[in-house]
Amino acid sequence: MDTIASFFSFITTPVSWVIVQFHTVYGAIFGPDTGWAWGLSIVSLVVLIRICLIPLFVKQIKSTRNMQVLQPKMKAIQERYKNDKQRQSEEMMKLYKETGTNPLSSCLPILAQSPFFFALYHVLSSIASGKTIGVINQSLLDSARQAHIFGAPLAAKFTDSADKVASLDATQLSVRVVTAIMIVLMSASQFYTQRQLMTKNVDLTVKTPYMQQQKMLMYIFPLIFMVMGVNFPVGVLVYWLTTNVWTMGQQMYVINQNPTPGSKAQDQYLQRLLKSISTHNEVRSKRRRNIVSAIVAKGPDRNDNERKFVNSLSKTGLVAQPDGTVIKGEALPEGESHAAKRQQPKRQPKSKRQTGGGQQPAPKTSGTKPSDDATDEAPKTSLQKNDEPQDSQPKPPRKTGNGAARAKSGPRKGQQRPKHPTKK
């Protein structure tokens, strides 16, 4: 570790200068020789570095999501060229180039802060050895050696002997208790950060080897930090614990505000967005309007969470517009077919269809009892039958033989020949 730290010795002067500047501020509040002044200086160094690394963190998020989207295509390439490793690599690089994805982007924040980490380790090791380094002169060196965090010196390690710890005005037990607690917290924060990413911000509909690798890293990384942590000075443990807590909080914010499509976090976010829209009948921020606009633009390519959001929004009587706003109106395209079915008239029962209840009455017939006017006009209508008397009207056929079949089939079509009156 000392050899690696000395490799980054060129950056120890800027790191030590930043620590001294923060120490001047906190020393005026808590005292120059206190652990609070030096510990908060290291924490402020972490915060400053992580703020500068925010653009790289954004690239890391985009790269991680692009890798998740490309996993099915990558798996298809691996199966297609499983016997030709060179062609497989060429197709992979071609896929990365076409989609603008860089697999190393997910490691950029860690790679970028590694020089600062090793430079801080080199500074604290020099303080433990009683050597001046960078802009830390002899007076600052003596002040830093007197600084303790919960009874443990900043430059002490878990593996230091009792004599070395005693030279820093501390006991071996206090150093080991403090460092053990910090190592456990550091590993636990690393595990929770990775677990939060896997359980909430991953598209669960895509099962790929990439997810299995992430699950393995979720357990491997905390073990690595736990093993390496026994060789870190207390000041470096403060640095790394602060980094993990910052990463955890930053990731929680990103998951809650900009989740991965198809993930559990997206479902929870869209539920909160639906509640806000239903309460205020509008989309209240530009960022949310952009999200709604993106969902509308997807059309039939929406995932299950987005379709659920659109359907729920339609049930409240609101329609999402392409610009991300909402208006009151009918259902969206997903509900149009259902609305059309509801607008169709209901089918009448069989009994009403047989009695003609659903048909409009003919102009010359009526379902009511004939009135006196109708009976007066009856002789006029009987002229078509050659003025036959009423008793000469044809009787209904008997239900025997062919007559029964004729009765079932109804009267013959066309004008019938009138029958002569019966002679007695």
Image: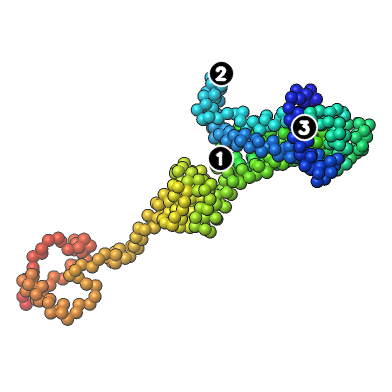
Q: Where is residue 10 in the image (x, y as percent from the top left)?
A: 74, 24
Badge 1 or badge 3: first in the primary sequence: 3
Q: Which of 41 and 307 is in front in this view?
A: 41
Badge 3 or badge 2: first in the primary sequence: 3
Quarter of the image with the C terminus is bottom left
Q: Residue at x 46, y 53 (%)?
A: 326
Q: Residue at x 42, y 56 (%)?
A: 329
Say which of marks 1 and 3 sits in front.
Answer: 3
Is 3 left, or right, of 346 in this rendering?
right
Say which of marks 3 and 2 sits in front.
Answer: 3
User: How many marks can you see?
Assistant: 3
Q: What residue type is labelled 3?
A: Ser
Instruction: Answer few, some or many: residues within 10 Å of disc 2's Cα (few below 14, many 20 plus, some between 14 and 19).
Output: few
Q: What residue type is labelled 2?
A: Gln
Q: Nearer the viewer, residue 98 or 82?
A: 98
Q: Return the residue at label 3.
A: 16
* Cα distance between the residues tagged 1 and 3: 48 Å
Q: Return the residue at label 2.
A: 86
Q: Is residue 104 above or below residue 420?
A: above
Q: Which residue is drawn at 39% across and 51% down?
A: 337
Q: Is residue 272 visible to the viewer in this orientation of the structure?
A: yes
